[in-house]
Amino acid sequence: MSELAERLRQRGWRLTAQRRVVAEVLAGEHVHLTAEAVHVAAQAVLPEISMATVYNTLNELVNMGEVLEISAGNGPKRYDPNTAIAHQHLLCTRCGTLRDVAPKGEAGLTVPPDQQHGFQVVGVDIMFRGLCPACAGT
Amino acid sequence: MSELAERLRQRGWRLTAQRRVVAEVLAGEHVHLTAEAVHVAAQAVLPEISMATVYNTLNELVNMGEVLEISAGNGPKRYDPNTAIAHQHLLCTRCGTLRDVAPKGEAGLTVPPDQQHGFQVVGVDIMFRGLCPACAGT
DNA sequence: GTATATGCAAAGCATTTGCATTAAA
DNA sequence: TTTAATGCAAATGCTTTGCATATAC
């Protein structure tokens, strides 16, 4: 069983077949899936799982802080199970593919105090835009 | 007349009252508006302007590279007319307010070559998340 | 005069919600 | 046994589109 599902069960998360499958589909991915892709992958294991349950479960995982929800330009949101290690993203602006990259040069990236405009800053998201190998053509 | 509208007319953009008003509403904002907010502001000047025309015009400006479209978490997209000067954004995760901040510490923010996964990287978007003064409470 | 933009209303996609049924604890 | 999750289908929010009319050039 996935380590994630087990950990959440111990926190009192009611562990159903659907939730287990969603957690397993997400786990360990470094290319991040849409809700629809999660649904398709989950259905391969549990054919009766519904889209509503996929969305419900993804939102719970996001609210529990176990998964990151990423709105990348157009198209549907993508879900990133890698919350433990700080990282950045690489987005294909054509097909929407989203994957992780390890941080480099992020140190020192802050909002100058005189520009916070009264905001209480909590974090920063960094997204590199470009074309994936498939979309770049050559 | 707005400098933006004038510039685009010279590039062959057919200049209608609606387009002029949308360009004027956007110009010079450093707090970025949603399509709906643009519609409301535009209607104050030109009551008959439709939502469809606002969307059409915003998309044209985005395609012409004159405006940036920003999908920030939930809620509608926001439109940023400041394409000339590189900058970062400050997002209120509660109410969606989005505003500019000047870069600091961005130098050296690149994807390590061994992690490009074949991507052709074009640019990077940096978004600080937090709470705006109104949403932070105090 | 001709090509293009507009407004309207309907369609589209991603996501959420209400409710009766089913299953976990 | 009790409380919460599921599946369905309908509703929602944002955005786009088709088409007849109006307007810039």
Image (cartoon, coloured by chain):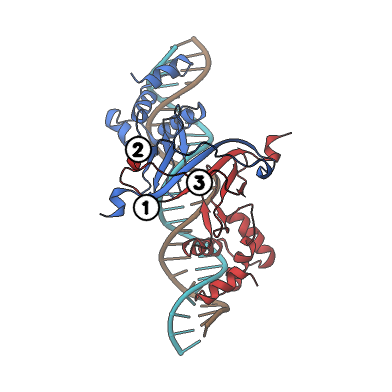
Chain colours: A red, B blue, C brown, D cyan
What kind of residue is marked 2?
Val
Question: How packed is label 2: few (under 14 Cα within 10 Å), some, or many (20 or more)?
Answer: some
Outermost residue toward the right? A138
Q: Check whether the beta carbons of the residues at disc 2 and disc 3 lie within 8 A of each other.
A: no
Q: Earlier in the sequence, mark 1 or mark 2?
A: 2
Residue nearest the observer in this picture, A125 or C7:
A125
Which residue has dot 1 on it?
Answer: B94
- Determine which of the numbered discs, if any, sits on residue A107 in the image: 3
The quarter in which the N terminus of chain A is drawn is: bottom right
What is the spatial separation of the Cα atoms under label 2 and label 3, in whole angstroms?
A: 27 Å
Instruction: Name which quarter of the figure residue B97 lies in.
Output: top left
Q: Residue at x 41, y 35 (%)?
A: B102
Relative image position of residue A97 (x, y in whole percent): 62, 46
Residue nearest the observer in this picture, A46 or B115:
B115
Q: Do the residues at pointers 3 and 1 share their chain?
A: no
Which residue has dot 2 on it?
Answer: B31
What kind of residue is marked 1?
Arg
Front: mark 3 or 1? 3
Relative image position of residue A14 (x, y in whole percent): 52, 75
Answer above or below: position of C20 versus B59: below
Instruction: Name which quarter of the figure residue B137 lies in.
Output: bottom left
What is the spatial separation of the Cα atoms under label 3 and label 1, in whole angstroms?
A: 26 Å
What kind of residue is marked 3?
Ala
